[in-house]
Image (tube, rainbow, N blue to C red):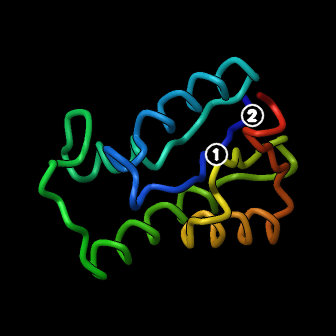
Amino acid sequence: MRKAYIAGPMRGYDLFNFPAFDGAFSTCVGLGYHPTSPADIDRLFENWIDYPPEDFVPTIEDFKRFIRRDLNFLLELSPENGDAIYMLTGWESSKGARVELALADFLGLKVLYEDDLS
């Protein structure tokens, strides 16, 4: 099955934009992809039930850990399999999403933009 990595803004959004990532997950499934969401990666590795704790303030070490994990998931995708990156609305303002898009471009992955699919 084709895979898709969801990229988009998190910092500065209520609940770190997890609801948008959750909605994109469903959209990707509807498009025939098996998606990977940074929100779900965070839930898994940070043991967050639904959302980050309200008082969570990430440090630079947190950001390094997050981007390292996320890029490793993205590195597992392959253009030969028809894999893609799905860019959430507002991705342009996210340093992390821009890094993820640059890696996806380097890997030759298909790029899907939420704004184009709406």
Q: Which label is found at residue 72?
A: none
Q: Residue 1's x, y, as percent?
A: 72, 28
Which is nearer the N-term, disc 1 or disc 2?
2
- Nearer to us in this view, 26 or 89: 89
| Spatial separation of the CA atoms under disc 1 and disc 2 | 19 Å
- Nearer to us in this view, 13 or 61: 13
Q: Which label is found at residue 2?
A: 2
Q: Residue 27's x, y, as percent?
A: 65, 24
Left or right position of 103 against 111: left
Residue on which the image places disc 1 = 88
Left or right position of 1 against 52: right
The residue drawn where x is 71% and y is 70% is 103
Whether label 1 touches label 2, CB < 8 Å: no
Per the image, label 1 sits on a secondary structure element best described as loop
The residue drawn where x is 63% and y is 72% is 99
Give the answer, above or below, for where 35 lies relative to 85.
above
Say what amino acid the circle numbered 2 marks.
Answer: Arg
Left or right position of 54 against 87: left
Q: Residue furthest left?
A: 55
Camera-side mark, 1 or 2: 1
